[in-house]
Image (spheres, helix red, strand yellow):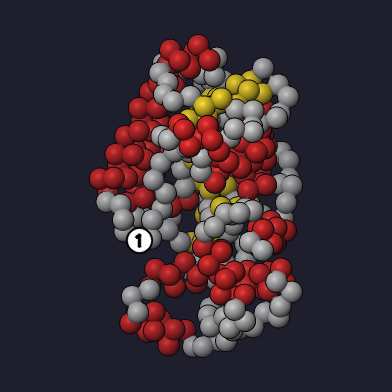
Amino acid sequence: MKRVLITGVTGFVGSSLVAYFHDREGLELYGHSRNTELAKEQYRHFHIRIVPAFTSTDLNALQINCIIHLAGIAHDLTDKYTEEDYNKVNFGDTARLYETFLTSSTSQFIYFSSIKAAVNQSESPAHEELKPHPVTPYGKSKLKVEEYIQNQNLPVGKSYHILRPCIIHGPNNKGNLNLLYRFVKTGIPYPLGAFENKRSFLGSDNLVFVIDQLIQLSIPSGIYHLADNGSLSTNQVVGIIARALNKPARMWKIPQQIIQILFKLTGRQKMLSKLTDNMEVSNQKLLLAIQKPFPVSIEEGLFKTICSFQ
């Protein structure tokens, strides 16, 4: 029997993992959240035990084999959080949890970092050997955690896996894709057709598949980039949304310079960057490690997510 503890269990990734693993034979699922009552209510129909707090002694008593650490402050475009907030939660809390892991009998630690710990944008598939250069407080806090984990003495019999996912999506995930979906649904032509970018995506089906493989297989400790195969332009994503809506994909190719001026005047440069920047992520190291293909293509995964918005 393998016992897995998920922190940040009420979030989108946590709920995806619970839905995937909660009735798996030979696996017992435990969850942790800052809001214990919310977690218990959210998973009242699932086979998962919510633990309010834990020490290394608790991990030993529960015989936890693997910790999947999701909890933390997510990337924020509203500038709500300060660098101190990111350091306190993303670094401080994770460092304490990792110390608990090291002094317990738990053998595996899976940490969800972010591609933002390495690069903010990339015109070619970013691989793990690139020298990290985070530019946001969020990315810097994630890199700080990565370096901390790598610099600790790892006892024999323990392993860590640092995952750097790109943008994650899946059914009922109300993120930036939902905003683009709502725009396309209006029938107004997409005005940024002149931008031909390339972006990597990660569907929840492939995400839970990777975690399943990490738990089952003996994969060397280290950093692994996490993304679907291939990349898509935002124009292609608009096309997938239109297909899901059974509408024609309508676009305007307004000159890039005019668009950039308009977004600058309205103070929405970050939004423009999210829609038009390049961010390609290589998944080759991970694929070589698990020796299995991802179950869902990048187009199929996005189409499934978009259909869930309806």
User: Residue under circle 1?
Assistant: 78
Q: Quadrant of the C terminus?
A: bottom right
Mark 1: few/some/many CA within 10 Å (<14, 14-19, 20+): few
| Residue 10, position as x, y percentages in the image | 51, 40
Instruction: Determine the image quadrant of residue 182.
Output: bottom right
Residue 131 visible: no
Q: Is residue 230 above or below residue 223?
A: below
* The quadrant where residue 90 appears: top left
The percent coordinates of residue 83 (x first, y second) are 27, 49
Identify whether 269 is placed above or below 71: below
Question: Relative to the observer, which residue lies in front, 237 or 102?
Answer: 237
Local SS, label 1? loop
Q: Residue 147 placed where, x, y %?
A: 38, 37
The answer to whether residue 211 is left or right of residue 144 is: right
| Residue at image coords 43%, 70% | 271
Position of 242 compared to 39: left or right? right
**Most foreground residue, 17 or 288:** 17
Instruction: Judge by depth and name the residue closer to the eye, 25 or 287.
Output: 25
Q: Disc 1 marks which amino acid?
A: Thr
In the image, taking residue 245 as reference, residue 234 lies left or right, namely left
Q: Residue at x 64, y 32 (%)?
A: 46
> Is residue 92 shown left or right of residue 40?
left
Q: Position of residue 32 (x, y in %)?
A: 48, 30
Q: The N terminus appears in which quarter of the rendering?
A: top right
Residue 45 shows up from this direction: yes
Residue at point 67%, 37% (across, down): 20
